[in-house]
Image: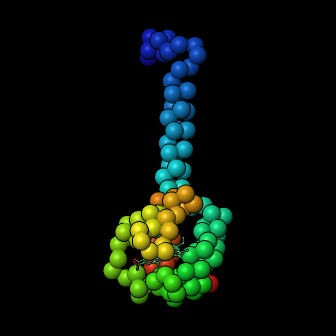
Amino acid sequence: MRIFLSLIPKSSFFPSVFMALGLFFCISGQAALALAEPHQARQAELLHLLRQDCGACHGMTLKGGLGLPLLPESLDGKSDDSLAAIILDGVPNTPMPPWRSEISPEEAIWLVRRMKEGITK
Ligand code: HEC
C-alpha cells in the first residue's frame, strides 16, 4: 500500500479525476433532464406562444380555424414525432409555417404532449 501511495504524484491526480468525472455526470444528467422537458419559464413561454401565435390560426382554444383543431381527440392516433415534424417544418403549400427557428425539437415534442393532454387554461 505504501508503495502504491508513493506512486501517486503530489498533485493528487486521482481525486481530481474523480471530481472531474463527478462533475461530468452531474452536468450530463442535467442536460438529459433539460432535453426531456423545457425549464419552467420556457414552458410558460411556449404555452403563451401556443395560445397566441398558433391560436391565430388554430383558434385560441385550439378548436380550429384556418388551421386544423389541435384538441386531444383530433390528435389521437397521430404520432408525437410526425406532429412535432409538422410544427418544426410546417406543411408545404398550406398556411402552416415552420417554427424551427423559434421552437427546438424537444420543445415541439413537449408541445405535442401538452396538446394531446388538452390545454385547459
Ligand atoms: C398561419 C396559420 C397557422 C399558424 C400560425 C400555425 N398553424 Fe398549424 N396548421 C395550419 C394549417 C392550415 C394546418 C393544416 C395543414 C394541412 O392542410 O395539412 C396546420 C396543421 C398543424 C398541425 C397538424 C395537425 C394534424 O392534425 O395533422 C399541427 C400539429 C400544428 N399545425 C401545430 C401548430 C403549432 C404548434 C403552431 C404554433 C407554434 C401552429 N400550428 C401555427 C396553420 C397554422
From the top left corner, tell me how far across and down residue 21 is, in percent: 50, 35
Query: In this view, which residue lies farthest toward the front?
Result: 93
From the top left corner, tell me how far across and down residue 116 is, in percent: 45, 79
In the depicted structure, whether residue 50 falls above or below residue 69: above
Q: Residue at x 56, y 76 (%)?
A: 54
Q: Residue at x 55, y 57 (%)?
A: 101
Q: Quadrant of the C terminus?
A: bottom right
Q: Quadrant of the N terminus?
A: top left
From the top left corner, tell me how far across and down residue 32 is, in percent: 48, 52
In the depicted structure, whether residue 98 falls above or below residue 5: below
Q: Is residue 40 visible?
A: no
Q: Is residue 56 visible?
A: yes
From the top left corner, tell me how far across and down residue 61 is, in percent: 57, 86
> What count of labels does the image hold?
0
Q: Residue at x 49, y 78 (%)?
A: 115
Q: Residue at x 55, y 33 (%)?
A: 19
Q: Is residue 42 left or right of residue 4?
A: right
Residue closest to the eye, 59 or 7: 59
Q: How is the rendered protein coloured?
A: rainbow
